[in-house]
Amino acid sequence: MLDTTLQFAGLIAAVVIYARAEPVLSRADGGAFTLVGAAAYLLTAGSIWGGVSILLGYVPSVGAALLSVGLALLLLCGRRLEDIHIRHIPPLSRKEHEQ
């Protein structure tokens, strides 16, 4: 039962990670290889590798499954966190900038 749960969680996480990382590669400029581009390539390749491995019968460890699900959740809510951060921190006034 635990094996099936770990496989299911890992597979769902791999699909979410791929769905969030692949568009970054599609929109990237060919000459703009940055850390973000490298991260997108690694996330895409890792999610494909993980998904295929799970479909072939691999059971991820609890730690790997937790890490994958956590990363998938982070990618899903990343934009919301940025919006919350921007919305809730008031801009500095001119006096605060000068100090």
Image (spheres, grey):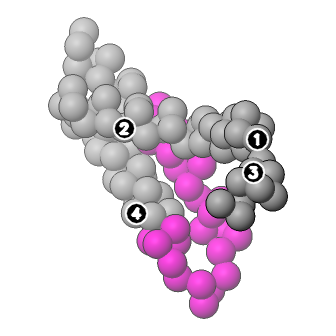
Name the foreground residue: 60 vs 54.
Answer: 60
Tag 1: Cα neighbours inside 10 Å, few (<14), some, or many (≥20)? few
Residue contact at pointers 3 and 4, CB within 8 angstroms? no
Instruction: Give the amino acid at mark 4.
Output: Leu
Tag 4: Cα neighbours inside 10 Å, few (<14), some, or many (≥20)? few
The alpha-carbon separation of the residues under discs 3 and 2 comes to 37 Å
Instruction: Give the amino acid at mark 1.
Output: Pro
Residue 74 appears in the rendering: yes
The alpha-carbon separation of the residues under discs 3 and 4 comes to 37 Å
Q: Which residue is mark 2?
A: 68
Residue 83 appears in the rendering: no
Name the front one of labels 4 and 1.
Answer: 1
The alpha-carbon separation of the residues under discs 4 and 1 comes to 36 Å
Residue at the image point whose x is 60% and y is 90% from the top: 31
Name the front one of labels 3 and 4.
Answer: 3
Instruction: Give the amino acid at mark 3.
Output: Leu
Apparent side of residue 25 relative to residue 60 in the rendered image (left or right): right
**Counting residues from the N terminus, which is met first, the one under dot 3 or under dot 2?**
2
Q: Which residue is mark 1?
A: 90
**Counting residues from the N terminus, which is met first, the one under dot 4 or under dot 1?**
4
Residue at the image point whose x is 81% and y is 58% from the top: 94
The boundaries of the magenta stretch are 12-38
